[in-house]
Amino acid sequence: MLLLLAAVLFVAVTITGTRGSEPAVVALRSFVTLVSGLLCILRAVLLRGERPPWALFGAGIISYGAASVYFSLAVSGPAEGAAAEGAAAEGAAVEVSAADVGWLLFYPACYVAVILLLRQRVLRFHASVWLDALVGVLGVAALSSGIGARLTTDGPADISSVVVGLVYPLADLLLVLLVVTVFGLLRWHPGRVWWLLGGGLVGFALADSCVFVLMADGDYAPGGLLDIVWVLSLLAPAFAAWQRQPWRKPARMSGWSVIAVPLVLTVLALALLVIGSMMDLPLLTVVLAAATVLTALARAAMTFVEVQQLAESKVLARTDDLTGLTNRRGFIERLSTLEGNIADGDSFALLLLDLDRFKEINDSLGHHVGDALLVEVGSRIAGALRPGDLHARLGGDEFAVLLEHADADTARRVADRVLVALSGAFEVGGMTLHVGASIGAALYPDHAADAQTLLQRADVAMYGAKSGRTGVEYYRPGAEVNTLLRLDMIESLRAALGTGQLEVHYQIKVELDSGRSHGVEALVRWRHPTRGLLTPESFVPLAEQAGLMRMLTIEVLETSLAQCRRWREAGLEVAVAVNLSASDLLDRAFPDQVRGLLAQYGLLPSALELEITETTLMLDRVRTAAVLGELRELGVQIAVDDYGTGYSSLAYLQELPVDMLKMDKSFVTRLEDGSGLRRAKAEAIVRSTVGLAHALGLRIVVEGVESASALDKLRNYGCDVAQGYFLGRPRPADEVTAMLSSPVVRAAVDAAATEATTKATTEATTTAQAAAEVAAEVVDVSSAEAAGETVAVAQAEALAQAEAVAQAEAAATAEAAARIAAEIDDHDDGGTGARTPAGQLWG
């Protein structure tokens, strides 16, 4: 505020006609100049960012102001300070003094400060700009010395005074050209800071040049409008320094405006060298002109190097650093180009690929392993493509393939080849890893009218393939709705963790030799606020994609172990089985988490069983073996879930610490469905698997038991434990508790027998009615009596046939029930043989 008041007072005093050499005017002018410089330096000290340029501006302004004070006090005296200063500043009739050093230092300080500020506003600041500045300085020096030497030949003037007098206007011209160049680079939208700064520097240069002209004509008098412009121009940088500059998109240093100034000065330096060959010029002028030309040549050489680097950087800007493939930017540019140049009737396909289970590997084994795996994946994908197909890594574990001149069949064939290429094991860092992939395909112009929409719809199809585990999916209109629902489900699941929305239901596992249940499998359910109770198929794949499986597993473990503790306090020795994901099995800290939870609920390790799939086992056999080994040493039981449907291998049964095998329910289903040959093969597989497991000291658990006859067969094959809807559906803990102390198999057989008899009777009645209707239609209407007899006969035959079928089914069920019940009676405690009514268990 004080500075502004002083500036206003100076303007008022000058306008009233007070001479510029008056002590009060000199004092005001010196105060405004010095305080302006101090404000610039203060801004550099107190505020972060852009400190060097503002410090240089402040130093340059203080240097100029201090030189003015020195000249007024020491050279010309207070009475003539301003007039003599103006004359000396222009080198006219005044000898060169020490004040000129301070005045001339103002210019290089401003040049460097402007260039430093420009660095903050351009996308890439080339080092050659410093050579441009050097060309400018050398060129101005060469011109000044050459013109000065020429002027001294026409009169007795001192050469130093003439040269210094010429330096000022040329330096002012260079300052104006520099500001104009900067404004041109910034597309003449530099912002408030640059307008204040540029206006002040240009105003100073113009005022200085006007004084030079007036001095040459002998018309200059201190004071007046030029002094006002001078002072206000030096005040402008102080205001610019404290302005808040909003963020703007960086400008590119391109176009003729960058090289205009050095180009002009280089041409002038060449002209001086030519003139020097024809007439005498001072040695200093020739040296400076030659230095200007050599610096310009160095600048040209550096420009050539920069152009080469620019060409390389353009390639690198479109290349993925890790895999060497095209990156997202390059892929989208190629896609957009292809869209614009495609011929009528032609089409192309876009495949978007995302790796399955990559996050678990990357998080558990480290980013260096994940990076090496991505390189191998990129190589395999490239090997499955046609010549000329563009292959890119878009980021993370997402890849894309652009198939030119391709239809739906071509896209399908290429996608299948890619899946086959990725199905084999990857050897990375001495480890054997397996990853799958989900591919989404979209066709142009069938599925989208522009490149961005095509990419988005391929992404939608890819997530459809991932959620459905189908491998490859094409875009289907309306699939975006499913994508939005999926994103909403992921966010809702993230919010549901730890809030009690996740419930655990339990399915009993029955010992086939006793018919009793001593174990349950924990199966998570989600009580969604608006969609009701959701099964794992609805949200577990989303949890895997979103990286939520670890938190989900820990919550299920906590809930299951807490319930197991309550059962044991009630006298029920029950073990609970919990399913693990790949991220759990690859986490070296997981065994310690399990140990802590068992201690928290006061349970022995034998109370917990952990189930893992074959596919999970094969992700990293070394780390898997280490984690399972720690769990096994802890005393936790390990079961291989869905045995026979994944990477079945006898080797891992020997290497990995496994206690039991859970046969997939598909084998149990084949025992009773399909042709005789199909059932025979299923029976052979089950028998051989049971024999293998027992020979290795493993127990066999069978899933998907849905009938008494299937249960009877599995008992005969030697299976140890069974579970399925026939024995009990997954239920909340309070409903399962009643079943844990009862002979579950006998109750289930009784219920199945009753159900079979009722069903057979119903089917017999339905068949008889249908037969009567058919018979009535085929009988001639004219013979009513004959028709009645035919109907009666048909009804009797149909009824007899239905009764025979019902009796056969009931007999088979009763036989299986009797056989199972007789074996169970031998194992019931107390030998009472008391049966538990089915209604007591099933409600």
Image (cartoon, rainbow, N blue to C red):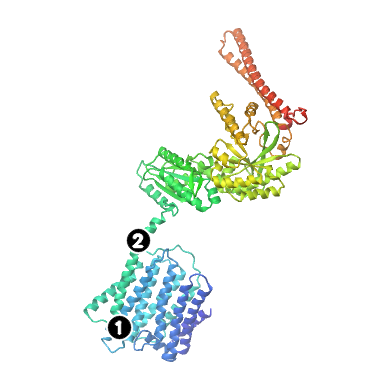
Q: Is residue 552 visible?
A: no
Report which quarter residue 663 is drawn in: top right
Q: Circle 2 sits on which residue?
A: 308
Report which quarter residue 126 is drawn in: bottom left
Cα distance between the residues tagged 2 and 1: 42 Å
Categorize mark 2 by other alpha carbons within 10 Å: few (<14), some (14-19), many (20+): few
Type of amino acid under label 2: Gln
Which element type, helix, strand or loop, lies under badge 2?
helix
Type of amino acid under label 1: Gly
| Residue 797 in picture, x, y percent from top left | 62, 13
Sequence-first disc among 2 and 1: 1
Image position of 526 with respect to 320: above or below: above
| Residue 260 in picture, x, y percent from top left | 33, 69
Q: Circle 1 sits on which residue?
A: 148
User: Which callout, 2 or 1, points to the residue nearer the camera?
Assistant: 2
Q: Is residue 742 visible?
A: yes
Which of 491/9 is in front? 491
Which of 165/673 is in front? 673
| Residue 608 in picture, x, y percent from top left | 67, 43
Report which quarter residue 73 is drawn in: bottom left
Which element type, helix, strand or loop, lies under badge 1?
helix
Judge from the rendering whether residue 351 lies leftward or rightward of residue 710; answer left or right.
left
| Residue 473 in picture, x, y percent from top left | 48, 40
Image position of 325 with respect to 172: above or below: above
Which of 771/120 is in front? 120
Q: Are discs 2 and 1 less than 8 Å apart at CB?
A: no
Image position of 307 with respect to 87: above or below: above
Q: Looking at the rendering, in which quadrant would you find the C terminus?
A: top right
